[in-house]
């Protein structure tokens, strides 16, 4: 009995350690493939590239709208994702990239709190090419403000509902 | 020394046995969540951009972006298991009904009816119910009245 006890302990410790290491290795792999991370190559065919880039674009938008300290990094990531989406070409499932580009320009102008005439001209061109009825930068800025306000309302409404259900 | 070696070998063997178990357990546990996150994030971002385009662009550009969205959703359905399938069906239905309304506006009654039929098929597959055209029109009208997000 005395002889087997240390061996059993070693076995149990080894199993626990091995299981935890395997779990951590996979977790690590997932974290470093997270859409919010920087400079991860987007792999696969055109569809997979669109899927991954859109997921990352979404995460970056979340970071930017939350007003986090990482906003400028997220804006750079958005730019990189749009560049990658542009490289996908005119596949049948390509998203409205010009709208996303115009939105990025608005976000950048919000972050520096000033309007650059060159940026406004670029934004106007993008919106005209997208066939907008009112292709003005002011309209786009107002639209983004409205979207952000609506998102905030939904978030505050959701947290209020969650608190109410907790009370019940 | 010999005894220490014996324990070390047992420990190493146990680690090598349990390591793949931990890895595959994590894969099974986390991969689904990770795929869910990627799928919902990508779709919501795509839909947001198309929604902005639909509400602000002319009919030709709106139609183009909606067609791309429907194509993207079809590809996604072919390649992956849809995790939030009810929300997916609703969104697909909205996109198809918007296309139907645009075709109707352009005077293409046949194409419009085709999209309405496709919407009905999507809803029938998800809800096992045959919805009327009137219901589908009210459904998309309600979606169009929602604030922009």
Image (spheres, rainbow, N blue to C red):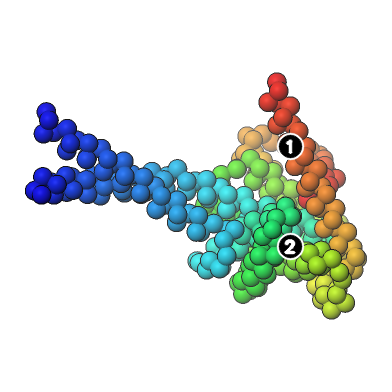
Q: Are marks 2 and 1 on the same chain?
A: no
**Quadrant in the picture for residue A80:** bottom right
Q: Label 1: which residue? A: A158
Of the pair A70 and B108, the residue shown nearer to us: A70
Where residue A65 appears, as percent x and y from the top left, is 74, 55
For residue A48, side relative to residue A9 (left or right): right
Where residue A145 appears, as percent x and y from the top left, is 84, 56
Residue that sits furthest to the left in the current view? B2
Residue that sits furthest to the bottom in the current view? A118
Picture layout, residue A140 above or below residue A10? below
Instruction: Measure the C-alpha gap from mark 2 to mark 1.
Output: 30 Å
Of the pair B119 and B72, the residue shown nearer to us: B72
Tell me which residue sits at (50%, 55%) in the image: A31
Of the pair A48 and B114, the residue shown nearer to us: A48
Is disc 2 placed on a helix, strand or loop?
helix
**Quadrant in the picture for residue A36:** bottom right
Nearest-to-viewer mark from 2 and 1: 1
Picture layout, residue B22 above or below residue A63? above
Kindly identify which chain the residue marked by label 2 belongs to: B
Picture layout, residue B10 above or below residue A140? above
Picture layout, residue A90 above or below residue B30? below
Kindly identify which chain the residue marked by label 1 belongs to: A
Tell me which residue sits at (17%, 32%) in the image: A5
Q: Label 2: which residue? A: B65
Residue that sits furthest to the front in the current view? B1
Where residue B56 appears, as percent x and y from the top left, is 85, 60
Tell me which residue sits at (41%, 49%) in the image: A24
Tell me which residue sits at (8%, 48%) in the image: B2
Is residue A42 visible in this depiction of the protein?
no
Is residue B20 visible in this depiction of the protein?
yes
Is disc 1 placed on a helix, strand or loop?
helix
């Amino acid at each position: 009995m005395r002889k087997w006890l240390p061996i059993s302990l070693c076995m149990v410790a080894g199993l626990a350690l091995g299981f935890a290491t395997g779990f951590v290795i996979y977790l690590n792999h997932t974290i470093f493939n997270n859409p919010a991370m920087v400079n991860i190559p987007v792999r696969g065919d055109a569809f997979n590239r669109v899927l991954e880039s859109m997921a990352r674009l979404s995460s970056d938008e979340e970071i930017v709208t939350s007003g986090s300290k990482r906003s400028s990094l997220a804006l750079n990531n958005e730019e990189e994702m749009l560049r990658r989406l542009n490289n996908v070409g005119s596949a049948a499932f390509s998203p409205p990239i010009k709208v996303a580009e115009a939105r990025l320009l608005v976000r950048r102008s919000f972050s520096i709190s000033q309007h650059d005439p060159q940026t406004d001209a670029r934004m106007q061109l993008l919106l005209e090419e997208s066939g907008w009825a009112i292709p003005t930068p002011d309209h786009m800025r107002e639209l983004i403000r409205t979207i952000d306000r609506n998102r905030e309302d939904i978030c505050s409404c959701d947290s209020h509902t969650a608190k109410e259900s907790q009370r019940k | 020394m010999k005894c220490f070696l014996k324990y070390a070998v047992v420990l190493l063997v146990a680690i090598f046995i349990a390591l793949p178990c931990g890895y595959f357990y994590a894969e099974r546990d986390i991969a689904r969540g990770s795929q869910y996150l990627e799928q919902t994030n990508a779709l919501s971002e795509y839909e947001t951009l198309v929604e902005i385009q639909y509400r602000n662009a002319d009919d030709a550009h709106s139609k183009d972006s909606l067609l791309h969205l429907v194509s993207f959703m079809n590809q996604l359905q072919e390649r992956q298991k849809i995790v939030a399938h009810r929300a997916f069906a609703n969104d697909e239905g909205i996109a198809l009904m918007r296309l139907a309304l645009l075709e109707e506006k352009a005077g293409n009654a046949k194409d419009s009816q085709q999209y309405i039929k496709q919407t009905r098929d999507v809803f029938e597959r998800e809800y096992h119910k045959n919805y009327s055209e009137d219901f589908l029109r009210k459904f998309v009208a309600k979606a169009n009245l929602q604030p922009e997000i």
